[in-house]
Image (cartoon, grey):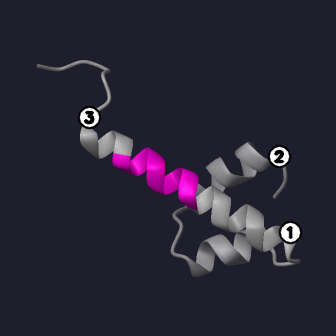
Amino acid sequence: MTGSAPTDEHAELGALASELIDIVTRAHRLGFCRRRVATALGASQHELALIEHDTGHP
């Protein structure tokens, strides 16, 4: 069955993205550059865009 209902895989990816945003935000509070932290953690360009959108800052 197809549709837009989230699957377990989508839920897991959402949790990972949320965790990545949390880590990057905490690192930024300690003075680290969000983009550098995210890149060091292996974030994709799409994930970097989500982080910048979520936090409102590059």
Residue carrying label 2: 56
Tell me whether the residue at label 3 lies in contact with that at label 1, contact meaning CB atoms closer than 8 angstroms.
no
Q: Does the stretch in magenta take in 17?
A: yes
For marks 2 and 3, give the CA distance. Answer: 28 Å
Q: Nearer the viewer, residue 17 or 49?
A: 17
Quarter that holds the C terminus:
bottom right
Would residue 29 appear left or right of 50 to someone viewing this image?
right
For marks 1 and 2, give the CA distance. Answer: 14 Å
The amino acid beneath tag 2 is Gly
* Rendered residue at 36%/41% (across/down): 11
* Rendered residue at 60%/81% (across/down): 40
Q: Nearer the viewer, residue 21 or 35?
A: 21
Horizontal and vertical percent position of residue 3: 24, 18
Disc 3 crowd rating (10 Å Cα; few below 14, some 14-19, many 20+) is few
Horizontal and vertical percent position of residue 34: 76, 68
- The disc, 2 or 3, on the residue closer to the chain's N-terminal end is 3
Tell me whether the residue at label 1 lies in contact with that at label 2, contact meaning CB atoms closer than 8 angstroms.
no
For marks 3 and 1, give the CA distance. Answer: 33 Å
Disc 2 crowd rating (10 Å Cα; few below 14, some 14-19, many 20+) is few
Quadrant assignment, res 7? top left
Q: Is residue 5 visible?
A: yes
In the image, residue 28 sits, relative to residue 13, either above or below, namely: below
Horizontal and vertical percent position of residue 39: 61, 75
Residue carrying label 3: 7
For residue 29, the mark is 1
Q: What is the span of residues highlighted in magenta in the rendered image?
A: 12-19
Would residue 3 appear left or right of 1 to someone viewing this image?
right
The amino acid beneath tag 3 is Thr
Label 1 vs label 2, nearer the camera: 1
